[in-house]
Amino acid sequence: MPTLRASPLLRHFLAVADAGSLTAAATRLAITQPALTKNIQKLEGELGVPLFERLPRGVALTSYGRTLLPHARRIQAECHFADVEMQAFRRGRTGRLRIGAGPFFGAALVPVAVMDLQRHYPKLDVELVVGVNESTHPRLFDGALDIVFCGLPDGAELPPFVERHPFFEIEARVIAGSRHPLARRRDVPASALVEYPWAIYQEDREAIAHLYAAMREAGTKPPRIAVETTSLTMLIQLLKDGPYLTCVADAMVTAQPDRGLAIVPYARPIWTFPAGALLHRSLARYAPVRFVHDAVRTAAARLRLR
């Protein structure tokens, strides 16, 4: 089935930039290394600048190559988005939608929205990637994801081709299992929080930094992070069955009260931040993107009204 793709020269440039090696890139592209080298030299000749510096082992981007890289990624992404929309119209809304979600959105809101989406578009395949901003945002910017539901960065930090849609403010609070001793108290001081071990979602370094800052501001020592895990399911199990505390969105508790978690009555949130959707402007009118965007936004609004 024909698809719209970036030019071979740009695709070969991106392959070498990602692999850091002509040999590895040629293997991924299933072409010979001399053919790949010839195309890189052809692109360098057309641009009149060197794109790669040849090293004893592999290659590295020159300053010209680093300048070209984000533009090449965007061209590749735009070709993909155009192809997605054209194929959807041609084949009756079939295709693949690639959704990214932060831990809260991925656990509480996006799965139901995806089920609704596939009821309306039964031929549409969905790829769902759950992770923190540090992992999902680069994939969105490079065109590997179509829309991401997450904590939102400042608009000035975003590429001009990405739209920022705020839904609501998230409060990250201290969370424990519903049977934890602190969950049953009426008021918990900062000094009590550091007496228990903490379990943290390993990839969320920003949350750890805010936690340490909040404890410093409260005049107490930093908490002991006893467990770091890449599994949200494991984190929830540790909280339910053990003495651990964590810091995640309070909506993780309010959205799914049957998880066996509770908000510890500490006086203030550890931090607050806007949450919503990031998506490519090219896909803003694409019906499945609009559908899942509106479904998650509606669910978020209902959640904040509880």
Image (tube, grey):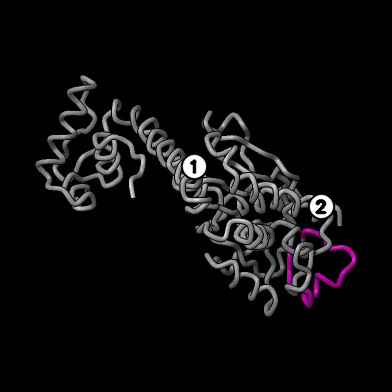
For residue 156, side relative to residue 245 (left or right): left
In-front residue for pair 7/32? 7
Q: Is residue 25 above or below residue 78?
A: below
* Distance from the alpha carbon under mark 1 to that under mark 2: 33 Å
Q: Dividing the image into 4 quarters, which one contains the C terminus?
A: bottom right
- The percent coordinates of residue 119 (x first, y second) are 63, 61
Q: Residue at x 18, y 44 (%)?
A: 22
Q: Secondary structure at mark 1?
A: helix
Count of marks overlaid on the render: 2
- The percent coordinates of residue 200 (x first, y second) are 60, 63
- The percent coordinates of residue 103 (x first, y second) are 61, 58
Q: Residue at x 20, y 45 (%)?
A: 21
Instruction: Check if residue 176 falls in the magenta segment.
Output: yes
Q: Residue furthest left?
A: 34
- Lower position in the chain sequence, tag 1 or tag 2: 1
Query: Amino acid type of disc 2?
Result: Arg
Q: Is residue 225 above or below residue 89?
A: below
Q: Secondary structure at mark 2?
A: helix
**Magenta part of the protein: which range?**
175-190
Q: How busy is the neighbourhood of tag 1: few (under 14 within 10 Å), some, or many (20 plus)? A: some
Q: Quadrant of residue 231?
A: bottom right
- The percent coordinates of residue 173 (x first, y second) are 75, 57
Q: Which mark is residue 85?
A: 1
Residue designated by label 2: 304
Instruction: Check if residue 247 falls in the magenta segment.
Output: no
For residue 71, side relative to residue 227 (left or right): left
Query: Amino acid type of disc 1?
Result: Glu
In-front residue for pair 236/39? 39
